[in-house]
Amino acid sequence: MALAQRLHQLEVSTTGAGFSRLNELLNAWIAGTGIQQGVLHLTCLHTSASLTINENADPRVLKDLQAWMDAVVPQDGRGPTNGQGQRLPYLHDDEGNDDMPAHIRTALTSQTLSLSVDRGRMLLGIWQGIYLWEHRAIQHNRRIACHLIGELQTAKEAEPIERNNRAQHLQRRNGNKLNAMVQSRHNPEAWATDGGVDTDVDLLVDRLHDLAEHPIDQH
């Protein structure tokens, strides 16, 4: 394999504070690069959104995360309580009450992620999802820099894999045909025509019948 690298900017439209899953978009782009194994580095190109890896099965996890963030860093334009019990307005409020809170939320989370790539896909746990976490209250268009470095599969290397896949497919198909033929021709009473004694052929056919009923897993 030859070493290669690809640089891309992924664009994501958000609908306000919350999560946008990136797994499918990233894996589709990786597949198009031809790189089979390597490292993917992601950078969120904004100061009011971030990246995170978290639960991808139960949406309640994401709702709880957002509720926690809303409680820790409220989007009402005021900072934490000071020594006198007051919550003073933020100095930076150019774009509204959610402006400075979004920057604080970004500082508390992560702007970058580095992930392993294997067989042309991100290497993740079964319950892991990659998300863009929007920290502003309204819709925004976000950009994520994707830098992939790894081994590029060449056409000569891909050919044997494709040939092996075809061979395995034919083997499974022919095996299924053989199983069907054995099943259709099997006569469990054939031994009676040989004087009631099982011959070697009878035993072989019976064994083939057993295998046809319970084929060996070829995967």
Image (spheres, rainbow, N blue to C red):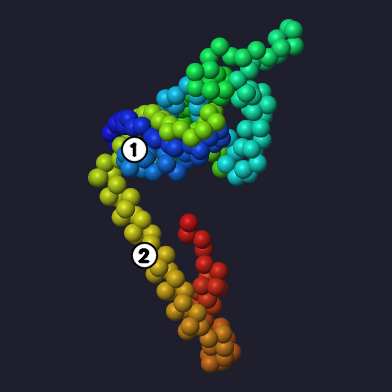
Q: Secondary structure at mark 2?
A: helix
Q: Secondary structure at mark 1?
A: strand
Where residue 52 is drawn, which disc sits there?
Answer: none
Q: Would you place residue 150 above or below residue 218 in this image? A: above
Q: Is residue 177 above or below residue 67?
A: below
Identity, as a three-letter code, of the amino acid under mark 1 = Ile
Q: Residue at x 68, y 14 (%)?
A: 87
Residue 178, image x, y percentages: 43, 74
x, y percent for residue 186? 51, 83
Q: Position of residue 48 (x, y in %)?
A: 50, 24
Q: Which mark is drawn over residue 35?
A: 1
Q: How many marks?
A: 2
Residue 11: percent from the left, percent from the top? 39, 35
Residue 38 visible in rendering: no
Q: Which residue is mark 2?
A: 170
Tell me, yes or no, if residue 67 can be seen here: yes
Point out the frontmost of discs 2 and 1: 1
In the rendered structure, the answer to whether residue 86 lies left or right of residue 21 reads right
Task: Say if mark 2 contacts mark 1, CB within 8 Å.
Answer: no
Q: Is residue 166 left or right of residue 199?
A: left
